[in-house]
Structures are given as C-alpha cells and as structure tokens.
Amino acid sequence: MTAPAAPTLDVSGTAPVPFWRLVLVELRKSYDTRAGFWLLVTIGSLVALVEGFILVATLVQETPIFYEDFAVTASFLTSILLPVLAIMLVTSEWTQRGAMVSFSLEPRRIRVVLAKLVVSVLLALVTLAFMCLLAVLLTGICEAVQPELTEWEVEKEFFIGFTIIQLCNMLIGFALAALLLNTPAAIVIYFGYWYLLPAVLAGLGAIDDTLADVLEWINFRVATFPLIEWEMDTGEEIGKFVVSGTVWMVVPLVLGIVRILRTEVK
C-alpha cells in the first residue's frame, strides 16, 4: 500500500505582510543590535560632548551665540556618522546571513529594500528634529544667563537646505551599502567620499583649469554648499548638484537595488 498524498496547503488567502510592519522591523534592526546600539550611543555622546563644550565656552568667555550655531554643530556631527547606520542596516543582512530569513518571510525583495530606505530617511529626519530641540534647550540656557549676547534668529531656508544635505548624505551611505553589500568596504568608501574625494579633486583641478571645471560637476559635497544658505540660484549650480548627485547617489542606488534583487542568497 502507498500512503495517501498529503493535502496541499492553500495559502492563497493569506494576507501579505503589510509594508508598515516591514518598516517597523527594519527600524528595530537599526538599534536592536550591538553595533547599531553602540553607534547611536557614540553619536549621542559625541554630540553631547561637543555641544556641552560650546555651551561652557560661550558662558565662561561671555561671547555672542546664535541658535544656528548649536543646530549646525549637532547636525554636522550627525551628518557624518548617521549614514554609517544606514550602511549597517543594508549590509548586515548579507554579512550576518540574515538575508535568507528576511527574503523567506518577504519574498518580494524590493519591499524589504524600500522599507530599509524609508527607515533611513526617517532616522535622518528624527535626528534633525532632535538636534533642533537640543539647540533650543542650549540656546535657552544661554538666553537665561546672558540674554544680551544670545540670538534666536534663524532663516527657514537654512533648515530646508540642511535637511536636504542630511538626506543626501544618508542616501549616499545607503546607496554605497546596497552596491557593495559589505560593511567595511561601504564605510571606507563613504568616508573616502567625505574626506578624501574633495582633496583629490582639488589637487587634480590645480593641474589644469579646464580639468578643474569638469571635476566640479562630480564633486557632490561642494555642489551642496549653496544649499546651506539656500543660494542655489544659477542654472550652473543646479546643474552641478543634479549631475554630481546622480553620480554619487542615483546611479549607485539603482545599481545596488538591482544587485540586491538578483544576488543569490546563501
């Protein structure tokens, strides 16, 4: 006798995993690991240390202080280190062999990638909001101690421009991580982009004026400077921002997503 065939399990009526749940899962991954947790602790400690030093130095020396000073300092520090969190959010699936679990629970890989992208953007926006609140607190302390030397005035264009820059840095880290799928390599290249690339391009540009004009179109860091004061008025400045942003952000992101969708999970 042969055993009867087992009945086929009908899963056609099973509801798919909602996208918001994927976002919550990826958000938890950003801090619920030792690397992610200690990176956040490091960022918070560094911001507190630097901002505290500025506060004490301002009050002791009785120097003028602006709300913008605290906001810029905190946001600048986070714009350097926070993209590392986006890198680990992407690469940890592959370096720690969690991709098989993630893509088994959600076979549509593009939804997992988009959830990670949404979390990266949310982290950047939440961090900016927290930095602004911290700047309000520190400026309030200065206002209470030396009101005649404290200024609250800040232009909205500054916040818009700095928010765009913060998001661009986060997306560049995300794009490099998706393209390389390796944590150390993505971090090294990101910091090379941040620190080494401007110096290299400036050195090459010093050789020839024509070459310098060409290199300005791929130097994304320099192309974002007008955004800080919202002075990107000319078509050339906008063109440099779009072209260099495409080189460092759009192209790696598209290629990285394609690689994630096609790479064999081992």
Image (cartoon, rainbow, N blue to C red):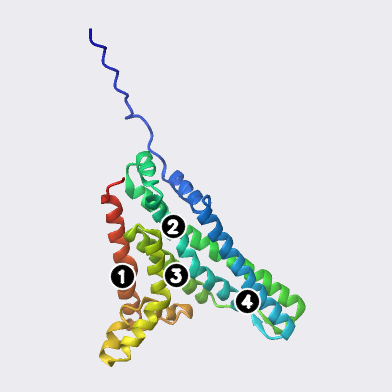
Q: Earlier in the sequence, mark 2 or mark 4?
A: 4
Q: Position of residue 129 (x, y in %)?
A: 56, 64
Dot 3 falls on a residue whose secondary structure is: helix
What's under tag 2, amino acid-wise? Met
Residue marked by disc 3: 164
Q: Which residue is mark 4?
A: 67
In the picture, residue 60 is in which quadrant?
A: bottom right
Q: Please give the residue where the numbered disc 2 appears in the rendered image.
A: 88
Camera-side mark, 2 or 3: 2
Q: Nearer the viewer, mark 1 or mark 3?
A: 1
Q: Position of residue 106 (x, y in %)?
A: 36, 41
Q: Is residue 98 above or below residue 54?
A: above
Q: Position of residue 260 (x, y in %)?
A: 30, 53
Residue 246, numbered label = 1
Label annotation for residue 175: none
Left or right: 248, with 29 as reference point:
left
Kindly indicate whether the residue at mark 2 contacts the one at mark 1 (C-beta within 8 angstroms): no
| Amino acid type at image mark 1 | Thr
Badge 1 local density, few (<14 within 10 Å), some, or many (20+)? Answer: some
Q: Do the numbered discs 2 and 3 sit on residues whose CB atoms are within 8 Å?
A: no
Q: Residues within 10 Å of mark 3 (few under 14, many from 20)?
A: some
Amino acid found under the numbered disc labelled 4 = Tyr
Residue 168: quadrant of the picture: bottom left
| Image quarter hosting the C terminus | top left
Q: Quadrant of the N terminus?
A: top left
Distance between the alpha carbons at the discs numbered 2 and 3: 22 Å
Is tag 1's residue or tag 2's residue first in the polypeptide sequence? 2
Q: Earlier in the sequence, mark 1 or mark 3?
A: 3
Report the front residue among 237 and 78.
Answer: 78
